[in-house]
Each structure stands twice: as C-alpha cells, then as structure tokens.
Image: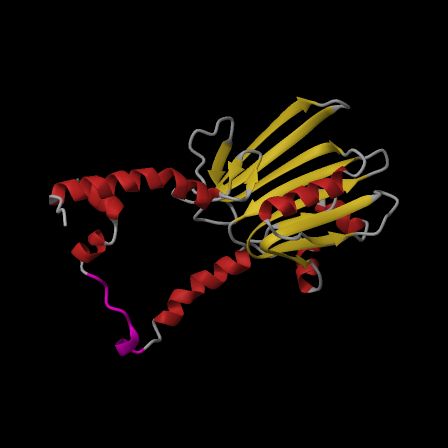
C-alpha cells in the first residue's frame, strides 16, 4: 500500500476543502432567492442600499433600496428590504412591486413554477373576489406560516401598541387600509420559508410581494430561550467542552488556514 507524506495528505485535504466551499455556499444560500438576493448569503457587494440598525431586532441591520423603473404599461416602483445579522448573513429579504401587472393566468403559472422549483406544493390562502380586487392570493413554501392578526394582537395594533418584533403582511401592501376594509392581516410564524403574494384588480393591475425568511420572531424567541433550559440539566448529563486541539482537528478549514 502506497503511503503519502503527512504534508502531501494535508495539501490534498486542503485542496478538496477549497473545491467544496463554493458548493457549500450555494447550498446554504438556496433555494430561496428574491431579486437575485439569496437567503443565507451575504450582502457584500450590494450597492445603493441604505442600512441602519434595526429597531425591531437589536442584533440585526435593516437595509432598504427603492428604485423606479419603466414598465410596458406604466412606471413601476420596486422596494427591497433586507435584514442581516452581525456577520452580514441575510436572514430576511422582501421585494414589493407596485403597480404590478399580471397577464391572464400568470398568477397560477408562477405559483406552479415556484412549486416545481422548490419541489413542494404551495399552501395557498385566497380571498373571495371583492370590489377592490378580482384575485388575492398568498402562496407559501417551506416551514413559513401565516397567523391572522386578531383578538388582543389586533387591538394592540389598532391602538398603536402593536406587538413588537413582528413581521406583518397583508393583501394590499397597506395594513391600515386592509384593516379599514375588513381584510385580514397576518403575522409571519414558523420557520424558514418563501412567500409569494399577488393581488390583481380589474385590468390585471395590482400589487406583488415576494419574501424569504430564515426565521420568524416567534421561532427566534424559542431559540433564545433554549439555552436557559440547558442550565437546568444535571451536571452528569452536561457535555464537557472539547480541548482546543480536538476542535481544530474537527475543522479542516481551520487547519488549512494555518497551513
């Protein structure tokens, strides 16, 4: 059996790690992409975004970009919103387009296309035809869920004391107007997922929103509470931290960086 010197083996290992990095980054950032911005990717290189500390999530930065484009029918305003953590990883990305124009059967075709892309059947929430619109649909994939804003939560919002750290969506892109018309408003719940929302008036003109989220506030609060429960475990069941040299051996990237 042929034996290789340690340095040669280490070089081969580092070369394989280097080849895996692009693939791993693509996996981490897929499959949820909004306007070319992938969930779990980085905002590095993004231009024309105005960023500031998030008022809802202290550990995150809120970035926004708005632009006006010329469409086939009229000028279109699109607005992108991105929430990124301290490392620059994107945890939430949303895109709104108004007015949006939909061709005949385009809404159903796009939901079918996304379902095939995610290899998952869409979970749809539709409103009956009304005076203000002909079609109003929200399609979900992944672990993302919608919770109607009602009861005490609705009272708190209407009184100006809305529950903090909530991500809300509605069919019109105008929560106040939706409530005034008696239309539902939803809180995002669950986990990682993708949302596609379309509302079309007569003449197929309307509102479009697309968003992807890594987590929702309710799920994040559960994760923040989980370390506290670990403190209640008996000492015999707690795992002892590994020595640093063993941690390094478990991380080929770290070894290669030192090499």
**Residue 239 lies in magenta, yes or no?**
yes
Which residue is found at the position 66% from the left and 40% from the top?
209
The front one of 211 and 185 is 211
Which residue is found at the position 61% from the left and 26% from the top?
67
Q: Is residue 116 above or below residue 149?
A: above
Q: Position of residue 129 (x, y in %)?
A: 86, 48
The front one of 6 and 57 is 6
The front one of 247 and 49 is 247
Say whether residue 30 is left or right of residue 181.
Answer: left
Q: What are the residue bounds of the magenta stretch?
A: 234-242
The front one of 217 and 247 is 247
**Residue 171 lies in magenta, yes or no?**
no
Q: Position of residue 214 (x, y in %)?
A: 51, 50
Which residue is found at the position 60% from the left and 29% from the top?
66
State how the image is colored.
Answer: secondary structure
Say whether residue 3 is left or right of residue 70.
Answer: left
Q: Position of residue 109 (x, y in %)?
A: 73, 41
Q: Position of residue 233 (x, y in %)?
A: 34, 76
Give residue 159's quadrant in the image. Answer: bottom right
């Amino acid at each position: 059996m042929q034996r290789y010197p340690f340095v040669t083996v280490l070089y081969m290992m580092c070369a394989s790690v280097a080849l895996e990095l692009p693939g791993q980054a693509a996996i981490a950032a897929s499959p949820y992409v909004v306007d070319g911005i992938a969930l779990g990717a980085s905002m590095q290189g993004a231009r024309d975004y105005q960023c500031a500390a998030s008022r809802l999530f202290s550990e995150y930065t809120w970035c926004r970009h708005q632009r006006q484009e010329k469409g086939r029918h009229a000028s279109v305003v699109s607005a992108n919103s991105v929430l990124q953590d301290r490392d620059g990883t994107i945890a939430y990305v949303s895109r709104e387009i108004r007015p949006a124009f939909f061709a005949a059967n385009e809404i159903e075709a796009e939901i079918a296309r996304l379902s095939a892309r995610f290899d998952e059947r869409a979970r749809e929430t539709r409103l009956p035809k009304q005076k203000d619109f002909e079609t109003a649909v929200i399609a979900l994939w992944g672990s993302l869920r919608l919770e109607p804003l009602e009861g005490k939560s609705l009272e708190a919002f209407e009184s100006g004391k809305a529950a903090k750290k909530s991500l809300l969506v509605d069919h019109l892109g105008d929560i106040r107007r939706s409530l005034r018309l008696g239309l539902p408003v939803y809180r995002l719940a669950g986990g990682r997922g993708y949302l596609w929302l379309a509302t079309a008036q007569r003449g197929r003109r309307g509102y479009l929103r697309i968003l992807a989220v890594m987590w929702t506030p309710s799920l994040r609060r559960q994760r923040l509470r989980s370390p506290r429960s670990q403190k209640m475990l008996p000492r015999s069941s707690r795992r002892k931290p590994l020595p640093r040299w063993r941690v390094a051996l478990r991380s080929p990237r770290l070894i290669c960086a030192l090499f």
